[in-house]
Amino acid sequence: MVRRRSKHTRPARPLGAHHAHAEDKGDGRWIVRTVPGAKAEKEYRCPGCDQPIRPGTPHLVAWPDDPGWLADSGLESRRHWHTACWQRRR
Ligand SMILES: [Zn+2]
């Protein structure tokens, strides 16, 4: 009897890292994570257009891969962006 094991031997993805990826912009490398509308529970101000991101709006959050000397952690530099505004950014 032959068993197909591939589905069950594959390691699970770590929670939280599922949607994160790196993007290279003009000012360095950023880590970008998408935020689905169901998870957007607060209102944020988009630094690209200076307009609010309404709760329930799918958008993304980005932070520098290398925070440098400004912050102990890149997580402190997180910014919420409209998806379109981030994609316009160079
Ligand atoms: Zn925007």
Image: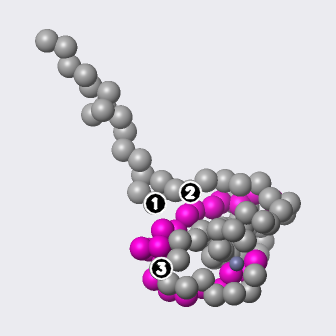
User: Marks 2 and 3: CB-CB under 8 Å?
Assistant: no
Which mark is in front, 2 or 3?
Answer: 3
**Gap in angstroms between the C-alphas marked 3 and 1:** 19 Å
Part of the protein shown in magenta? 28-48
Q: Crowding at label 1, few (<14), some or many (≥20) Cα neighbours within 10 Å?
A: few
Residue 64 in the image, given as x and y percentages of width and height: 71, 65
What kind of element bears circle 3? loop
Q: Nearer the viewer, residue 38 or 32?
A: 38
Residue 66 in the image, given as x and y percentages of width and height: 73, 61
Ligand 1 location (quadrant):
bottom right
Residue on which disc 2 sits: 20
The residue at 77%/54% (across/down) is: 24
**Gap in angstroms between the C-alphas marked 2 and 3:** 19 Å
The residue at 20%/19% (across/down) is: 3
**Gap in angstroms between the C-alphas marked 2 and 1:** 8 Å
Q: Is residue 70 above or below residue 88?
A: below
Say which label, 3 or 1, has the lower sequence index.
1
Residue 79 highlighted magenta (yes or no): no
Position of residue 12 in the picture relative to residue 65 (left or right):
left
Q: Nearer the viewer, residue 15 or 57?
A: 57
Say which label, 2 or 3, has the lower sequence index.
2
- Which numbered circle lies on residue 56? 3
Q: Nearer the viewer, residue 69 or 18?
A: 18
Residue 78 in the image, given as x and y percentages of width and height: 64, 74
Give, as a three-letter code, the residue at label 2. Ala
- Position of the N terminus by quadrant: top left
Residue on which disc 1 sits: 16
Which mark is in front, 3 or 1?
Answer: 3
The residue at 48%/68% (across/down) is: 36
**Residue labelled 1 has its Cβ within 8 Å of some atom of ligand 1:** no
Instruction: Count numbered badges in the picture.
Output: 3
Among the 4 quarters of the image, the one containing residue 62: bottom right
